[in-house]
Image: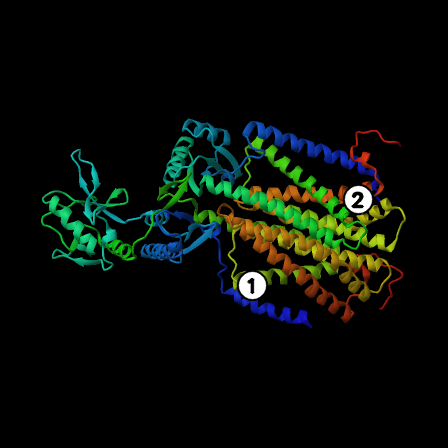
Amino acid sequence: MFGFALWSAVPLDRNVLGREGLRLGLDLSGGSYLVYQGDLSDVEPTNRDEIMEGVKGVVERRINALGITEPIVEIQKREGEYNIVIQLPGIADIDKAKEMVGLFTILEFREQDAAGNWTPAKGTVNNETLTLTSRYFKQNTDVAVNEYGKPLLVFEWDETGAQLSVQITTRLLNKQLAIFLGDEPLRGEDGNMIAPVVRAVIEDKGQIEGLSLADATELKDLLNAGRIDIPLGRWVNGEFEPSVPLYERTVDATLGADSIRKSITAAAVGIVLLLVFMLVYYRLPGLVACLSLAIYGVVLLAIFKLVPITLTLPGLAGFIVSLGMAVDANVLIFERTKEELRGGRSLGAAVEAGFSRAWTAIRDSNITTFIACIVLFWLGGTMGAFMVRGFALVLFVGVALSMFTAITVTRTFLRLIIGSQVVTNPAAYGVASLPTVRDTK
Amino acid sequence: MIDFVGRKRWFFLISWILVIIGIAALIISQIQLGTPLRLGTDFAGGTSMTLQFEPAVEQSQLREEMTRLGYGEATIQNAGDGNFIIHTREITSDEAEELAQELGAELNSQVEVADYYLASATVGAATARSAVIAVIVASIAMLFYIVWAFRRMPRPFRWGSCAVIALIHDVFITLGIFSLLGLLIGLEIDALFITGLLTVVGYSINNIVVVFDRIRENRAKGISSDFAITVNSSIVETLGRCLNTSLTTLFVILALFLFGGATIHYFVLVLLVGVIIGTYDSICVAGELLVVWERGEWRTLLPWAKTRA
């Protein structure tokens, strides 16, 4: 029988689970969820897809350069707007990642004005005023070691960069040229800002001294990740604010662990209460329902793992709520069976009638839940509501599976028990013994 | 047999009281806050953060310190175990960290920003719009489904309408309770609230369908020529199922409410409130509405109006 197949499949599923690793959402594992918009106002609409794909690649490489494993970077296109969605796992240095993603240019060269403030070093190429930045580095930056064993960051200018560099270093001969990372000066191993005095005109190659080996290596990887073609930030009332995410959520990893622990406690308490109630109230069928629910739980977890479905905290709540609903299907069937028994049918006939009568109610009631889930899943597509999606998906899968297990697994178990004639006393089914039920002693 | 249908005027009275309290709360909130419900970061934008204090601090002290530090407009919700969810204007994660440390120093407590969350007002507005559309679409889809499921009955639209009226009743009471909580303890609604609300709507329909399904069956069997008796025995026959399902669901939800994490604390509260109201409604309101419509006894809907005995 079909139920047997499912039953025998369960130990396999348990092995799959044994290898651990349900995929956890950032609210459980800790981590960051960032959404940026791109400033695409200067980009032709036809090129936007391509540009955003490029940005995505650079963002991914920049995050990887920081040593963060498994970042998820996606482009979301909604109503002609592009969002870049970045998910970072919990163990990472999130502040740094955020800074690196938000930077349009990584390194910027600055000079001192009369008042002593550092202002971007500019030059003119093809009648355009440009700032000298790492955007004009070739992607072959490397780390070398000087004669004293100190690390050097060695870079090469591309064509535009070389022209700018010649203009600027000629102008700044014997003056300081500082290097900024975002709004902060780049600092060396000794904590002082790196602002070397220009000793010669620099044409095609340059080097930065004083960095620690770790910083130099990280910068090398970041610079070689390529340049982002458009600034990332957010639009507010038609104004573009660079580097500020449209949406940001950071959950501490300990809170995530705490949430998991609490949810497991809650689930355990809830499930035990539920099982005890089923056993006391429905007796033998209650036991069958418990077994059926156990199988339901295992199969559901197996689905989460195999699909895989990312489990979030609302998703966990959805799982627990769906358990409650799985019970409902069983309750409907048992109540019907009880009624049929009281009506004087034999056990076998009562069980069959219980199933067929309860089916319409189970179907009708669950379809309305499906409707709610589908609508919620759609709602979950808007950023602020991304947690909603986890709940809707889990509840949908859970309710679908609960219909299936109630109809197949519970029925198979009940048929087996009745077929084997082990328990024939109606009291075991929660019905006071009735004269009309044949005594099959 | 318990006579549910015979007591319908009492049930309607209870429902009216709850609905009117709810509507009053929504109106007061609209006047005081400018919105019928206190909107959280998901809908209003801004920054929200969960601060974990060890040892726990008093909410009133926290409120005082926040006001002193210039965050007087912030909403503070207590999520238990020294966790507070704070919703304030947009600040960066660095500023949030700084604020947390200042609060910790003033209140002599170790503090950690466990959950930092920033949403632009534009994102909030988009989410709020989607949420409203979601609720409307879901309600219409469910109404159509019920009309379809009861298409073989005479006047299927009547069944669908009664179910939807019962649902609107549930939704108003739930909204009212949360509006009231928003006024009293500063509880904010977020996208998860909408999720909870729709789940409750689904659950409540689930219950109503089971009762209606039985009425449909009993009517086909012709157990009584009196529709009120048919409805009442259907309610009584399904009572065991309704209470058992609700109880088992309440067990797990209550466990989540008491032991689950701070993030879903108020989401679970929506489910808790909704399941209780949904159960009440399927036993005491939905079927009774059908009887009222069938008999045209519209005046019983207004329990305070005099009717002929």
Q: Quadrant of the N terminus of chain A?
A: bottom right
Q: Position of residue B263 (x, y in %)?
A: 52, 44
- In the rendered structure, the answer to whether residue B300 lies left or right of residue A124 reads right
Q: Quadrant of the C terminus of chain A?
A: bottom right
Pointer 2: what residue? B290
Tell me the tag on residue B262.
none
Q: Amino acid at mark 2?
A: Leu
Considering depth in this image, is B114 or A395 the residue closer to the camera?
A395
Could you tell me which residue is drawn at 31 percent across and 56 percent down? Answer: A65
- In the rendered structure, the answer to whether residue A132 lies left or right of residue A245 reads left
Q: Is disc 2 on the same chain as disc 1?
A: no
Subunit bearing disc 2:
B
Subunit bearing disc 1:
A
Q: Secondary structure at mark 1?
A: helix
Q: Are marks 1 and 2 in contact (CB under 8 Å)?
A: no
Residue A180 drawn above or below residue A73: above
Considering depth in this image, is A274 or A131 the residue closer to the camera?
A131
Q: Position of residue A228 (x, y in %)?
A: 32, 52
Q: Position of residue B59 (x, y in %)?
A: 50, 32
Pointer 1: what residue? A302
Q: Position of residue A408 (x, y in %)?
A: 69, 65
Which picture quadrant has residue A245?
A: top left
Considering depth in this image, is A100 or A256 the residue closer to the camera?
A100
User: Nearer the observer, disc 1 or disc 2?
Assistant: 2
Considering depth in this image, is A232 or A389 the residue closer to the camera?
A232
Q: Secondary structure at mark 2?
A: helix
Could you tell me which residue is drawn at 85 percent across and 44 percent down? Answer: B228
Which picture quadrant has residue A326?
A: bottom right
